[in-house]
Image: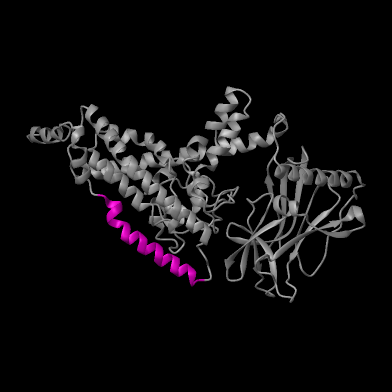
Amino acid sequence: MINLQPYLQSFGSIFGAERIALTDIYQLQSNAPNLLVYTMPAIILLTVLEFVGSYFSEHKTYESKETRGSLWVGLGNLIVNLLMKTILITSAIWIYNQLPWRMELNWWTLIFCFVGYDFCSYWSHRTSHYNRFFWATHVVHHSAEHYNLTVAFRQSWVQHFKTIFFIPVALIGFHPVIFLIASQLSTLYQFWVHTEAIGKLHPFIEKYFGTPSNHRVHHGSQEKYLDKNFGATFMIWDHIFGSFQYEEEKPVYGLTTPIENKTNPFVLNFHEYKDMLYDVKHSDGIREMLFFVFASPAKIYKHKLNNVEKSDLKTRKINIVVIKVAVALAMLLLSQMVIAQETKPAKLPTPRGKDLLFFLQRTPDANTVIYELNYKTDGSIDYKSPVKGSWIRYAENGIYKDLTGFEKKFAYGVKCKAIGDGAFEIRLAAYQKIAMYLLKSEDDQKYRIYIKDEGKNLLLKRIFVKVNGGTFWFPKVEYIDLFTTNSDNGIEILKRINLG
């Protein structure tokens, strides 16, 4: 008969570690290897190599203002981590000393600690996308519109609020040194996934591990990519909890509502807190106040749109800039009211033109917005702004009018971004979730507008917006119809986006 007593005694001794005196914190810090410091030269070298490669490549993954913003945020985060290091180690030791099942310092316990840490990291990350309080500690990481290794430096200066998600790992009884090493390994692993220089890897790796492809999906702002792939090292958690998505089309990076200031680290870190405080200040009771703090960002956005008419109009001091904006908006409102009162044709004509890319119509309206190729005075395409929009005023005898500055920025204008090889990504200013692409047709090498659906290019002809109620400034859009044609077989396809 096998004598199990020696094995049981050996197993029991694992959990018989002595308490750690708080006076030994300095010695403990010395014993814990600082992996981030050791690997910093390699991190800097890889970042510089990627930057140089981007500089000499047609596909630019770096933008000067955004890169400076990432470096400033990263520097500030480094300072915060140095200030917080002693507090976090002291807290880990205090928890460790309270437990009766303290583990000895054994290297193999790092395996189990790392897996547990990664599981808690998944839920910390996922909660950060569904709870505004924690989203405010994470939004800076998603604010970059270019995907490169410096995005890994964009870590919030107040991200230590999320330490509470890792308390369960500490309560298992792992030695504080093991816990700190697991944390550093997790941080290091997530550095290399922030790049476009590495394509898709072996299917097994793509399915079960965090890779650049999987994490590019997480940073994508398309609807199919939102709130996907939260795993840090292992993707198994995303498969189990239904949040996994493969990279299918090229992600569009950044927030669904981009930040204009790309450099100021204080704006990047705290703009969401500023918006949150404003919402709390103007909330209607404790229930709505708590909603603005802890609800998901998506629900809060919809809530504010649906209740914009309830915003109070209390008298307050208004500076001259706000007065100018108010006058401009009032003039635009009056002009639109006059147009709305004119007779609406039973059916709007289909616009024509050799440079016409697509057109947009909405109801109720008696006009059409057309989008054409934009040429410079010398007859060449303006690659900085290849698409321009303008009105056909059918209610005014079909005259053509340019979009106003306000309309270009907030309503019917488009945002164009070069993506290499003479192609451009196009987004409507009013609804930036629709990614369109200005590409040269393989048949005649002429520019046309396409949308991507399951990897296929669909030729876009027309957009129709169904409006049903709401206010002038915040119309209630019921759905958006995209009238497209399959480039392979010529079959017409209607793609509807329901918003009501």
Return the residue nearer the eye: 388 or 481.
Answer: 388
Q: Is residue 234 visible?
A: no
Q: Magenta region, mostly helix, strand or loop? A: helix
> How far across and how far down the image is residue 427, in percent?
65, 56
**83 relative position to 332: left or right:** left
> How far across and how far down the image is residue 429, in percent?
68, 52
The answer to which quarter of the image holds residue 354 is bottom right
**Magenta stretch holds residue 329:** no
Return the residue nearer the eye: 117 or 445.
Answer: 117
**159 relative position to 320: left or right:** left
Q: Quadrant of the C terminus?
A: top right
Taking the spot 31% from the left edge, 60% from the top edge, the residue there is 41
Taking the spot 54% from the left edge, 49% from the top edge, the residue there is 225
**Magenta stretch holds residue 42:** yes
Where are the magenta residues, as a range? 34-57
Return the residue nearer the eye: 71 or 192.
Answer: 71
Return the residue nearer the eye: 94 or 470.
Answer: 94
Taking the spot 73% from the left edge, 62% from the top edge, the residue there is 388
Q: Is residue 18 visible?
A: yes
> How far across and how far down the image is residue 399, in percent?
88, 59
Q: Quadrant of the N terminus?
A: top left
**457 relative position to 332: left or right:** left
> How far across and how far down the image is residue 89, in percent?
27, 38
